[in-house]
Amino acid sequence: MLMMESEENMPGNTGSGQNGEPATLAEVARELMIYLLRHRDARDTVDGILDWWLPGTAVSRSVLETALKELCRQDWIESERRSTDVVLFGLNKAKVSEILEHLATSN
């Protein structure tokens, strides 16, 4: 059984891309993983992620899509095609400990 880390012990929100500064690919990927660790059952589309997971973050759609593609390649995020133009993204719960380790060592 995986040990679930509490929010207090989880790496915090870095505030990337706020105050009008464009977020980098690495910052967006980190923010996505932090969000998903706090909301492990969350699943959403690219538009939903922009609106709900990263509000107030200056991130372009192309940077977000690239971050999602990379996180899917690493198998940290799963994608589920619902129709030809609807894809949902969510946490691969089997990789939680690996993700936590990565976030802790990449501060």
Image (cartoon, rainbow, N blue to C red):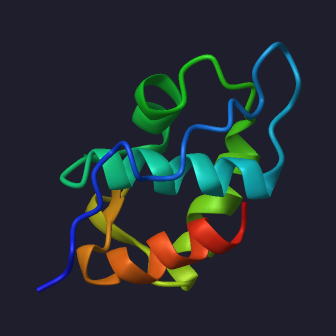
Image point (74%, 49%), residue name:
27
| Residue at the (22%, 66%) spot, across then down | 4
| 13 sits to left or right of 44 | right
Is 84 above or below relative to 22? below
- Where is residue 95 drawn, in percent x and y? 35, 81
Q: Is residue 61 left or right of residue 48?
A: right
Quadrant of the rendered image containing residue 96:
bottom left
Q: Quadrant of the N terminus?
A: bottom left
At x 37%, y 52%, the residue is 36
Left or right, residue 42 beside residue 64? left
Report if residue 99 is visible in the image: yes
**Residue placed most toward the observer, 105 or 70:** 105
Is there any visible trace of residue 86 in the rendered image?
no
Residue 99 position in % (x across, y down): 47, 74
Residue 5 pos. (x, y %): 29, 61
The image quarter containing residue 48 is: top left
Q: Is residue 90 above or below residue 98?
A: above
Picture coordinates of residue 52 (x, y %)? 41, 26
Q: Return the residue nearer the eye: 58 or 48.
A: 58
Q: Residue furthest front?
A: 9
Q: Quadrant of the C terminus?
A: bottom right
64 with respect to 6 (left or right) = right
Q: Please give the name of the residue rendered at 59% of the width and 66% of the height, measured from the top-left corner.
A: 103
